[in-house]
Image: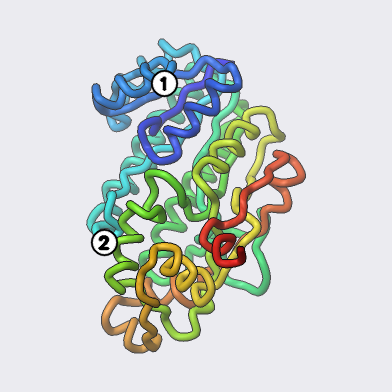
Amino acid sequence: MKIFVAGASGAIGQPLIAELLRHGHTVTGMTQSEAGAKRLIEQGANAEVANALDVSSVESALRRSQAEVVIDELTALPKNPADLPAALPGDRRLRLEGGGNLHRAAVKIGVRRYVQQSSGFFLKAGSGLADESVGLAVDASPGVAANAQTYTELEGRMLNSSPMEGVSLRYGFFYGPNTWYHPDGGSADQVRQQQVPIIGEGQGVWSWVHIEDAALATVAALTAEPGIYIVVDDDPSPVSRWLPAFARSLAAPPPPRISEEAARASAGEDAVYYGTKLRGASNGKAKRVLNFRPRRLEWLKDQEQ
């Protein structure tokens, strides 16, 4: 198949390109820099240097690729999570406006299938693990709600793009190489410096996925039934469980504990939501339809051995 990957230089883009090539696909990666293009060519992919916010360059790049399938992995997230609040407006613009340019070009050119990155952790609050029938938490704390609204708009655009087939992949929190949750990642540095506390009882449940497992699921989605798939591992874990284990895996001090009131005063309502209200997700559909077989969450597995 001829595949066009937007966001090909990002954390998910790199292992995804490798996996697509391993499966024998003809791959074109879109990147903003010549350095990114060079890396893609070295991997064995074709490269297009284009700014997603430039309508004409996106359409020209996509036409040259002759793609049958577009995979939209566009993000503008910082390397350091502490810089996330400042980066979010640009990230939202890239996903909605830049991704909109890509989506419209795909419809215009006659691309058969569009695969959209979405979120498997900003899910509506409730009991138990959420499945694909559960919507996104657009009524949560302000920052979480804004992110959930962005993903809701992305999914709506993708699912209403007839006659183009739409697939939404609700990934969990990424960990592994080139992510925040890796020994050399930004979140690991924060944990070492005891900047990430357990808030209240630490009951917020986080769903994770290794970046390479996410790439495998994305390749499987090329031929699966259109629709929404939650791509998370088998270890949805409350903060009170995963955060101390992550700290131990880094040989870091135990995370501090603070009350919800103290966290609300010092870090804001979003921090409290992440720590106490996030809802975990079920990967049952992805296992059944995509034959998804994720690895155990690394730092939990390490603690059990």
Type of amino acid at the residue the image marks with label 2: Ala
Quarter location, residue 183: bottom left
Q: Position of residue 9 (x, y in %)?
A: 36, 32
Identify the element where label 1 is drawn: helix
The reply to whether residue 96 is visible in this rendering is no
The reply to whether residue 241 is visible in this rendering is yes
Which of 33/295 is in front? 295
Q: Position of residue 98 (x, y in %)?
A: 35, 35
Q: Is residue 212 above or below residue 3?
A: below
Identify the element where label 2 is drawn: helix
Residue matched to label 2? 82
Give the CA distance from mark 2 to mark 1: 31 Å
Q: Are marks 2 and 1 in contact (CB under 8 Å)?
A: no
Q: Quadrant of the C terminus?
A: bottom right
Earlier in the chain: of badge 2 and badge 1, it is 1
Q: Position of residue 111 (x, y in %)?
A: 54, 20
The colour scheme of the drawn protein is rainbow
Residue matched to label 1? 43
Which of 288/191 is in front? 191
Type of amino acid at the residue the image marks with label 1: Gln
Q: Quadrant of the N terminus?
A: top right
Q: Is residue 42 above or below residue 140?
A: above
Which of 218/168 is in front? 218
**Residue visible at 30% across and 54% down?**
88
**Residue visible at 27% across and 70% down?**
193
